[in-house]
């Protein structure tokens, strides 16, 4: 459920016509619905209300500080994977003790930053990283709270590029050797073992891989407890999918029911790291048709948003529904929706059946709230688009459109060229 609907043939975000925003801020732009963000966060968080848990929103999926602030005000913690994300979360008012830090390549600088701020825990992904965290904590004279991110070798049945919990993936520690790593961690005086973590992949549309993972981690926790290693937190990661087109992922309540049945009696505080399921359908990308171009074998809609603005179609072949902002009776045709960039992979849709839209019209690229703006770039020196947040009948720019001067920030001519 989201709050992008047609009223008398015109697309609205909550109470605001998309056309009104386009007139004010120009195109392309990202537009998020406050009511949808709030609703999706509650739907997820409330599904686990009966157990002690912390919903750590995955910052990487949509990292604007206004949105992080909104979730923090709803009680969220954050899942971060870089110093930059930590900075964002703190700027947004997130309490450090609600932040978990994952990622295979944390630098010393990032580790120190997170230790100084007092985050909830580091999800460790390699023995060398464990040593690095212990060293940093020793230097700072503190104990670093840690979990080990276990790789359970479960097939998440998702796009291979976003699968993370298989043996061949770079993520986490092999389940079999994790026990030994916990034993080593237990002997390091500047580490404090907090829990067990995992994240098996993204855009999962079935519960069974989550359940398989949970079963494996439960056994691990039991074995660790027998070794007198206390496990207080179980971080089950993110990954719950959304509907982009025909997928029918489980509702968070269904996901929760299955997991909670299995978790019964485990005596751990649960952590979740959802991203996409909360923001994916709460944001759209609005773009204008620059030209319609009927080629000899294909029709093209050349729009003013490109792969630099929304990378998912060109990177993963992802499907995003595209619809005209003005809905009226017209014939259909098939077209590629392409951006202005000089690459054949610069498309938002291929061979798509669409209403025959015209030059100058606005299109809404749906389900663009997750991994949309955050993956945008300045390729071909295109300023990145603004982000707009709508609440009821008002809207505000929460990130300004970049200017040509923004593109050059930090660049300079070296003395030897002057
Ligand atoms: N936790 C960890 C450690 C992660 O690596 C991720 C996502 C999440 C949580 C959140 O997963 P979610 O609930 O959003 O599925 N760019 C790709 C998705 C990459 C996901 C990376 N990790 C895409 O556009 O589909």
Image (tube, rainbow, N blue to C red):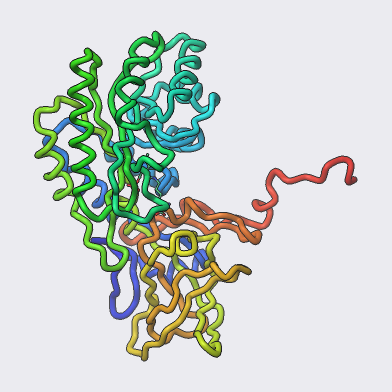
Q: Indicate the position of residue 317 as horizontal and vertical percent values.
A: 43, 64
Q: Indicate the position of residue 170 as horizontal and vertical percent values.
A: 43, 39
Q: Indicate the position of residue 86 as horizontal and vertical percent values.
A: 45, 33
Q: Nearer the viewer, residue 83 or 122?
A: 122
Q: Toward which corner of the image does residue 195 lie, by quadrant?
A: top left
**Location of the N terminus (image quadrant):** bottom left
- In this rendering, position of residue 273 left or right of residue 161: left
Q: Toward which corner of the image does residue 130 lie, by quadrant?
A: top left
Evaluate whether residue 37 shows in this view. no
At horizontal 54% and vertical 67% (from top left) the residue drawn is: 345
Q: Nearer the viewer, residue 186 or 281?
A: 186
The image shows residue 77, relative to residue 358, as above or below, that is above
At horizontal 13% and vertical 44% (from top left) the residue drawn is: 258
At horizontal 46% and vertical 20% (from top left) the residue drawn is: 133
- In this rendering, position of residue 409 left or right of residue 122: right
At horizontal 36% and vertical 25% (from top left) the residue drawn is: 121
Q: Indicate the position of residue 4 as horizontal and vertical percent values.
A: 31, 66
The image shows residue 207, relative to residue 10, as above or below, that is above
The image shows residue 399, relative to residue 136, as above or below, that is below
Q: Toward which corner of the image does residue 183 lie, by quadrant?
A: top left
Evaluate whether residue 386 shows in this view. yes
Q: Nearer the viewer, residue 403 or 209?
A: 209
How many labels were placed on the picture?
Answer: 0
**Location of the C terminus (image quadrant):** top right
């Amino acid at each position: 459920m989201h709050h992008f609907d047609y009223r008398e043939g015109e697309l609205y975000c909550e109470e605001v016509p998309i056309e009104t925003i386009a007139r004010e801020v120009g195109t392309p732009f990202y537009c998020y619905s406050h009511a949808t963000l709030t609703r999706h966060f509650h739907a997820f968080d409330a599904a686990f209300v009966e157990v002690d848990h912390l919903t750590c929103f995955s910052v990487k999926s949509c990292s604007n500080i206004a949105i992080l602030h909104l979730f923090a005000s709803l009680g969220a913690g954050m899942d971060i994977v870089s110093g930059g994300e930590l900075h964002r979360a703190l700027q947004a008012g997130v309490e450090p003790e609600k932040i978990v830090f994952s990622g295979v390549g944390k630098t010393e600088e990032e580790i120190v930053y997170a230790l100084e701020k007092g985050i909830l825990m580091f999800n460790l992904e390699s023995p060398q990283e464990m040593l690095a965290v212990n060293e940093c904590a020793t230097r700072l004279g503190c104990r670093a709270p840690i979990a080990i991110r276990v790789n359970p070798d479960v097939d998440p049945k998702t796009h291979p590029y976003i699968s993370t919990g298989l043996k061949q993936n770079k993520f986490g520690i092999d389940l079999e050797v994790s026990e030994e790593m916990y034993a080593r961690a237990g002997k390091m005086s500047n580490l404090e073992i907090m829990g067990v973590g995992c994240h098996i992949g993204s855009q999962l549309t079935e519960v069974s891989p989550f359940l398989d993972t949970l079963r494996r981690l439960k056994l691990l926790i039991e074995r660790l407890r027998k070794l007198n290693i206390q496990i207080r937190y179980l971080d089950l990661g993110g990954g719950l999918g959304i509907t982009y087109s025909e997928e029918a992922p489980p509702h968070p309540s269904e996901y929760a029911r299955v997991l909670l049945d299995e978790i019964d009696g485990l005596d751990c505080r649960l952590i979740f790291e959802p991203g996409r399921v909360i923001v994916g359908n709460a944001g759209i990308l609005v773009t204008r048709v620059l030209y319609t171009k009927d080629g000899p074998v294909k029709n093209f809609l050349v729009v003013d948003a490109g792969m630099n603005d929304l990378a998912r179609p060109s990177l993963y072949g992802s499907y995003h529904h595209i619809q005209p902002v003005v809905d009226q009776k017209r014939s259909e045709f098939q077209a590629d929706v392409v951006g202005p960039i000089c690459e054949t992979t610069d498309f938002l849709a291929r061979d798509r059946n669409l209403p025959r839209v015209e030059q100058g019209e606005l299109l809404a690229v749906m389900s663009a709230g997750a991994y949309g703006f955050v993956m945008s770039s300045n390729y071909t020196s295109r300023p990145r688009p603004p982000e707009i947040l709508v609440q009821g009948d008002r809207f505000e720019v929460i990130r300004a459109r970049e200017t040509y001067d923004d593109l050059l920030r930090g660049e300079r001519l070296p003395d030897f060229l002057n």
